[in-house]
Amino acid sequence: MSLSFATKNIQINGTPYRILLQNDNGPCALVALANVLLLSPSHQRKAQELVRLVDSGRTIALADLVTVLANIGIQTQSGANTDINQLLQVLPQLHTGLSVNPRFNGTFDDGMEMAIFRLYNVSLVHGWIIGDDNDPIAHDHVSKYSYEDAQRVLVQSYDIKRNNLQVNDGEQVLEDATYLKSFLARSATQLTDYGLRHLKEILVEKSFAILFRNDHFSTIYKNNGELFTLVTDFGFKDRRDIVWQALKSVHGSQDAFYTGNFIPISLETDTPSMQQTASFVSNPFSDQNENNNNPEDRRINSYQQIENDEELARRLQEEEDRDAAGSIQRNYNRFPKNPKSGKKTDAANSNGQKRRSKRDKLKQKCIVM
């Protein structure tokens, strides 16, 4: 484990801290967890060894970080019977390959990964949630699934339609898949307005947690009823005044940067390079980022990933459109043409109109953003 993490001095409401920054591989759960322990008053006593480690230099080796976190873990009440060797094997996964499965009701599938966060008494939260206020029917179809379950249902639905797969609950699968495709396409940023409200409700004022979104883990904090994520991008290493980024919108349009005292920062006077980096981090879902070749941006290009769920929804929708078009064409060829007008018979026209109407309704249900 030769990897290391840079550190950064910041101030939060006048109190000095030193935090870890993400390395070239992008944000990871290990950095988010360590920063919660470094900043949270409720973890201050147990995190003294971690504070000393991070204060000791400009960079912290991954091996040293894992060792200190393991020592903290076994000192907790729930970790008294934990095997330190097992912890030393599991903790590096928080940096390289931690896999969590969010459910669309606001929870996660339980497993070893969730047990790690419970060990340190740190909450893992997400806002990829479907609400029941606007469409209770869609909520019933979607909220029972996790992300991985939804992918299986979409694939199964595809096989039923394309390969005539026979399953006992085929109609239910097809119906659920329609609602799932619509939800995934409309929430490609893995955050919904309902999810934002949910996060504000479950997080206690002045408390820290870890936010999971788009396979990334961020340190999140609630201040005066608003949500903020800790800026840990290496591109802002020398900007001590930039500490927080607001979490106010689904697509990032309102997510401005803030000081440690929660005062908004204007980046208009920065260099073009810094402005590009700031814009990229502020709204990673903007189309302006597609041709961004700035070196600093490449360090954080994990933010600029293609949303797998949106692409899958698009592909499945295109397949259905082609199927519908092919069916219309086959009906066109099946019926004789009127020799005088060269038009299809009334039966063929009626059949085609019905299928087009059905397809249009399907498109309205599955809106691809």
Image: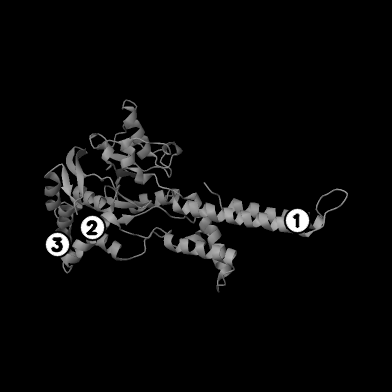
In the rendered view, would you say 57 is above or below 49?
above
Q: Position of residue 101 (x, y in %)?
A: 37, 60
Furthest toward the top, the residue is: 269
Label 1, secondary structure: give it.
helix
Image position of 32 (left or right of 306): left
What residue did someone put label 1 on? 332
Q: Are marks 3 and 2 in contact (CB under 8 Å)?
A: no
Q: Position of residue 302 (x, y in %)?
A: 35, 46
Q: Earlier in the sequence, mark 1 or mark 3?
A: 3
Q: CA distance from mark 3 to mark 2?
A: 19 Å
Q: Position of residue 322 (x, y in %)?
A: 62, 54
Question: Looking at this view, is 314 or 363 the one in front?
Answer: 314
Residue located 18% across and 43% down the image? 18
Residue located 13% across and 44% down the image? 55
Q: Is residue 353 visible?
A: yes
**Mark on residue 92?**
2
Furthest toward the right, the residue is: 340
Q: Residues within 10 Å of mark 1 (few under 14, many from 20)?
A: some
Q: CA distance from mark 2 to mark 1?
A: 61 Å
What residue did someone put label 3 on? 75
User: Which circle, 1 or 3, is nearer the viewer?
Assistant: 1
Amino acid at pointer 3: Gln
Amino acid at pointer 1: Tyr
User: Which circle, 2 or 1, is nearer the viewer?
Assistant: 1
Amino acid at pointer 2: Pro
In the rendered view, would you say 207 is above or below 259?
below
